[in-house]
Image (cartoon, rainbow, N blue to C red):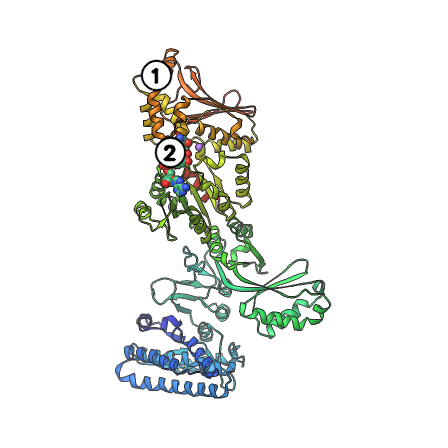
Amino acid sequence: MKILKFGGTSVGSVEALKALMGIVKSNIDEQEEIVIAVSAMGGVTNQLLNMANEAVAGNDFTPYLTDLEKRHFAVVKELVGLQQQNQVITKLKLYFQELEDILQGVAALKELSPKTKDTVVSFGERSSAFMISRILRIIKPETEFLDATTIIKTDSSFGNAKVDFDQTNMLVQNYFSLNTNNLVVVTGFIASNNLNQITTLGRGGSDYTAAILGAALNVSQIEVWTDVNGMMTADPRRVKKAFSMEELSYTEAMELSFFGAKVIYPPTMIPAFLKKIPIVIKNTFEPSFEGTFIKHDLKPSNTTIRGISSVDHISIINIEGSGMIGKAGFSGRLFSLLSREQVNVILITQSSSEHSITFAVNPDDALKAKELIANEFELELLAGKLEPVKIETNLSILAIVGENMKKTPGISGKLFNALGRNGVNVVAIAQGSSEYNISVIIYNDDLSKALNAVHDAFFAELQKTLNVFVVGVGNIGKELLSQINGHAAFLAKNNLLNIKVLGLINTKKMLIDTNGINLDSYQADLANAPEIADLPSFVAKMKALNLPNCVFIDNTASPLPSKFYKEAFEANISVVTCNKIANSGEYAQFADLKNTAQKHGVDFYYETNVGAGLPIIKTLNDLIVSGDKISKIEAILSGTISFIFNNFKGEANFHDVVKMAQEKGYTEPDPRDDLGGIDFMRKMLILARNAGLALDAKDVELGEIIPESCSKAPSVADFYQELKNSNTHFEQMKNDAAEAGKVLRYIGKLENGKVEISMQAVGAYHPFYALSGSDNIIAFTTDRYNETQMVVKGPGAGAAVTAAGVFADLVKVGASKA
Ligand SMILES: NC(=O)C1=CN([C@@H]2O[C@H](COP(=O)(O)OP(=O)(O)OC[C@H]3O[C@@H](n4cnc5c(N)ncnc54)[C@H](O)[C@@H]3O)[C@@H](O)[C@H]2O)C=CC1
Ligand SMILES: N[C@@H](CC=O)C(=O)O
Ligand code: NA
């Protein structure tokens, strides 16, 4: 035998009830013996409570009543067999008449006791269960309605009554032994005390009804039919990647539901646990989905936590003072007071000094709790042994839950790392003594970000997402987006990394789409975007979204984006840039950016600042962190100049070769930066700084490549004109070098804390002689690499290699998220 419980949404509409009929029918077809427990139609319980509140306030409640009747009658007309319709409507009318009489009484007495409230809400389950029993007669004529007030017995705690299991089990078993042939549809949620007054089992109590009956009848399975695919790893409205859990233990289910996962009412677990009856949470609207099993003897799990739950509006109350120290029974007195006065304490933390206690409550209870404490501890407060009670609001709880946590070290480290890296401030921490749960209190505004970050950290084997905002979609930016687009599926599969581009901006337009920008059509989408580019507002929006694992990419040559790097770090956003401006400006700014990123635990990657995609910054850092000492760096770091001097031979003229370098995407947006040596200077400065030297541009001795008349030309067009004008000069350079059997190289050197960059004609013996295309070469002389240098060589400019370097930096941000 199985018991099937259908919640409010599963009985809330004609569509839902048709699905319910299908589920019942397939059980009957399989000759499965079943009992059905149902909730009131979705929204009805609240409506009944509203009516009662209107009545007690002396307002007209009849419109609600009419509405209630209409909803039920509409279902009856659709789904109950024709011959039975009148009978069902008559019975429902009797219920509604009785309800109206009670509400008139409430209005007359202007009094609404918890006892009356229970009676009022009981009409929700009674009407739905009765109606459904008659609907199901189409499938099975021997279907009966059972009012649970006749079989579930409780004490008189109206609103949240305690079950008398001895009496209840006897009554349940007795009833079902006399009704073996019938399909029984029983009301969820409601029961009665020994005076046969109606009581209720607490909000969500229909699940509990199913467990009580299931345990009494020793069923093989309790099925809770709802409108979601079982229990999810986190609130799916906040965490898009949340997924259904296949199975979990009773304790885990209890902890998860206690902290917000509203899929199942926590007390439900107890009767099922004691009788070892599995509970299955299933989706009425997708019955073929396996659902979530809550049971003993689970399969070994491959994740350390089972899920993350959250309560998104709580307040905390803090009590502090010397009066608590060493006073056995202080917390006993405090918490029995709160329990007696029905203040639900969601979580407690006590500092080890015993100097303060913090506990979380629903915001509605906070003031009440404060007043209760002020009364109870009046003397202590007067004597100054306790500080006035403080309330903090706008908070949330996030709890990670799982039995495996107990056996695995490092769980809390991972949790706090994920929160810290993403700038989530933890207000208080609690770990249940069971070690099945670690809870943190954080600000409401951070909850979504925190849930996603923690979900990514613990279900890393499943996928993590980088939320990316890109500034600049020119030569490099375009190529980067195309590389991301082409390689996203690979990364998702092999690196479990999901790269989501949420924002794009160029000099004209900007586009932000929190669902992710389509990288097949972004060019048109950006061009047609309604918003005119406004970098400060782009950054403000990125920050306001408060996303985890967020990355700001600068693919421009402009100084403007770098003004926002610091702000990004302070908002726990990582920065990846191929733009050299920030790192080659004032030394103090470079140092400040590095420090700020480090302080906020986020990444600042700029490998492409030197030698494009070649591993130069990384190599230098590796040498330094492993304790090597750099004595000299010699390098050719301009792809453009390399290309020019590798191609400026024979018949070629200088002007055309420069043009070609620009067309191939090697030059800076402004080629005067390359040929004036500024770009090279920036790279040497960045290298020197990464080698630990606090150098500035003035410390670099920069040799000339081309006459000043060219490099200082007022515009790019003038520059090209000047190149033509200086043709004789260039021809001379070319011929002199050729005659000497040498090639021209523009070489940078860092030695003894000094940087020099100069034009040199080098012969075949020189290690920098044999270069081709846009090659860069860098030779490190160090303590360990002294006889033979460590050399990195290869193309050091161009869209493909540069974008690839930016992309690799981005993936590195992904990799460093624990
Ligand atoms: N070409 C290469 O081989 C390498 C280039 N780089 C660096 O890559 C960066 C980009 O170069 P390219 O793609 O060639 O430049 P580009 O001129 O082709 O593209 C720049 C993009 O940035 C946008 N942009 C400029 N200022 C902006 C602002 N203030 N706000 C928003 N968007 C803005 C432009 O609209 C354009 O989309 C430069 O900093 C360059 O030094 C680094 C290594 C190698
Ligand atoms: N314009 C630069 C590109 C790389 O930074 C170069 O030519 O090297
Ligand atoms: Na590089």
Q: Which residue is drawn at 48% across and 33% down?
A: 617
Label 2 beta carbon less than 8 Å to ligand 1: yes
Assign a secondary structure to mark 2. loop
What number is the disc on residue 669?
A: 2
**Amino acid at pointer 2:** Pro
Q: In which image quadrant can residue 612 be found?
A: top left
Mark 2 neighbour density, 10 Å: few (under 14) some (14–19) many (20 or more): some
**296 on left or right of 182:** right
Q: In this view, does 519 lie above or below 89?
A: above
Q: Position of residue 186 (x, y in %)?
A: 40, 78
Q: Which of 425 and 139 is in front in this view?
A: 425
User: What is the C-alpha distance between the residues marked 1 and 2?
Assistant: 26 Å
Residue at image mark 1: 728
Q: Nearer the viewer, residue 649 or 773?
A: 649
Where is residue 741 drawn, in percent x and y?
38, 12
Q: Is 502 in front, or is 525?
A: 525
Q: Are marks 1 and 2 in contact (CB under 8 Å)?
A: no
Query: Where residue 691 sits: x, y (%)?
Result: 54, 30
Q: Is residue 314 left or right of residue 138?
A: right
Residue depicted at x 34% and y 66%: 285
Kind of residue at badge 1? Thr
Residue occupying the far front of the picture: 714
Q: Residue 158 carries which label?
A: none
Residue 794 appearing in the image: no
Locate ligand 1 by image quadrant.
top left
Task: Name the residue at the right extreme.
Answer: 383
Q: Quadrant of the N terminus?
A: bottom left
Secondary structure beneath dot 1 equals helix
